[in-house]
Image (cartoon, rainbow, N blue to C red):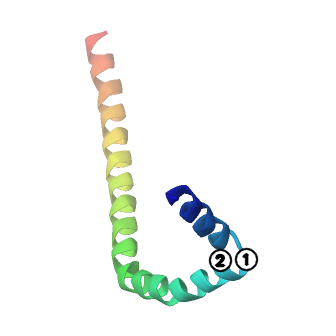
Amino acid sequence: MSSKIVDICLSTLKREEVKKDIKSIFAPIIDLILRDIYPYIYLSLIFVFISFILHLGIFILLFRNKSIFSSKIN
């Protein structure tokens, strides 16, 4: 009995008309959510970029110091 109900629901959800209706219902909700979280996405991208620049600077400083130390040891 329950497998028949599941099969009927799945066949209903596979129709193109139902898919379009579901997309049209959820599109405004998703747009609203994205509009609310855009500043946080931009802020996190800025933090990732700053972190990359800082890590790159640290790597360059360590690389310079390594060449200085290796020349003093030899």
Say which of 34 and 13 sits in front: 13
Label at residue 66: none
Residue at 71% across, 74% down? 15
Q: Quadrant of the C terminus?
A: top left
Labelled pair 2, 1 in contact (Cβ < 8 Å): yes
Say which of 31 and 6 sits in front: 6
* Percent position of residue 2, x then y: 50, 59
* Percent position of residue 63, x then y: 36, 32
Horizontal side of 52 relative to 8 (left or right) equals left
Q: What residue type is disc 2 on?
A: Lys
Q: Is residue 70 above or below residue 41?
A: above
Residue at 33% across, 18% down? 71
| Residue most extreme to the front | 1
Helix, strand, or loop for circle 1? Answer: helix
Q: Label 2: which residue?
A: 19
Helix, strand, or loop for circle 2? Answer: helix
* Percent position of residue 1, x then y: 52, 59
Say which of 16 and 73 sits in front: 16
Horizontal side of 1 relative to 47 (left or right) equals right
The Cα–Cα distance between marks 2 and 1, rounded to whole angstroms, is 5 Å
Residue at 54% across, 88% down? 25
The picture quadrant where one finds residue 29 is bottom left
Q: Label 1: which residue?
A: 16
* Percent position of residue 5, x then y: 55, 65
| Residue most extreme to the top | 74
Horizontal side of 14 relative to 64 (left or right) equals right
Q: What residue type is disc 1 on?
A: Glu
